[in-house]
Amino acid sequence: MAMTGRELHAKDGRVVVARRLAAGDEQALQAFYRSLSEKTLGFFPVDPEGVEAIARQVERAVSGEDLAYVAEHGGAVVAFFFLWNIRRPVPTLGIVIGDAWQDQGLGRQMLRLLLDEARSLGREAVELTTMVHNDRAFHLYQRVGFRYVGRTTLHLGTGQTRVERRLVYPLTPASEAQFRHRRAAR
C-alpha cells in the first residue's frame, strides 16, 4: 500500500509526482487551496484560510483515517486527491486539481490510483458526490465505471445543506450485483 513518488503524466508532457500527504504539508496544501480559482472552489468548496481544517486533513491522513495524496510539480502542490474514511467498507473519494492542470488527463490517473488502493485494501466499493452542475466530473466518473445512484443531501459544517449527485464504484462481486441494475432518477 505504501507508495512514494509515483509519476503522473499530463497530456502536454509535464510530469507531476504523486505522494502521500504527510505531516508538515499544511502550508503547501493551504498554498494550493489559495491558488484555486473561484470556479474551481465552486466545485470543491474549501476555505483556503481554514488552518484548523487543513491541519485536520493532514492529521487524518497521517493517522490512517484517510488515504490522501498530493501531486507536486516544481515543489508546489498542484492537486489533492483522497479516500476519506479508508477503514470503512465504502470510503469516499475526492479529487481537486489546480486550474493550470485541469484537462490534462490527471484526474483519470488519480482515480485509477485511488481505486487500485481501495481494491488492494479489500474495500467493497468507493463512493463520491459531485455538485449537480459539475457535468464534466460527473461524466468522467461514469466513463471510468462509477454508477449514478441518485441525489443526496449533504450537511455541511456551516449548518447549510447542499444537494449533490451520488456515484458508486463497485469493487467486489457482491457490490457489483447490488448496483448492476439499480437505476436512479436524475
Image: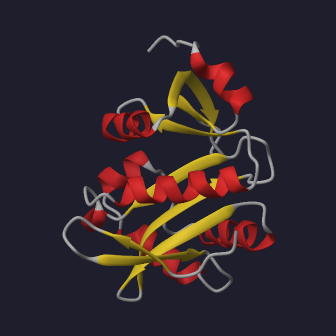
Which residue is located at x 47 percent, y 37 percent?
A: 130
Q: From the top left corner, tell me how far across and down residue 114 is, in percent.
A: 57, 56
Q: Residue drawn 42% across and 59% down?
A: 109
Residue found at the very far front of the displayed protein: 173
Q: Nearer the viewer, residue 37 or 152?
A: 152
Q: Quadrant of residue 38?
A: bottom left
**In the depicted view, which residue is nearer to us: 170 or 168?**
170
Which residue: 61% across, 72% down? 51
Instruction: Point out the residue furthest to the left here.
Output: 12
Quarter holding the C terminus?
Answer: top left
Is residue 18 among what the camera can see?
yes
Image: 162 above or below 77: above
Query: Where, quadrant-wise, is the N terminus in this rendering?
Result: bottom right
Residue 106 falls left or right of residue 67: left
* Position in image of residue 142 (x %, y %): 42, 33
* Residue 146 drawn at (x, y percent): 50, 34
Look at the picture and state if 87 lies above or below 72: above
**In the rendered picture of this protein, how many numbered marks are placed on residues?**
0
Q: Residue 104 vs residue 22: left or right? A: left
Give x and y (percent) for residue 158. Answer: 62, 45
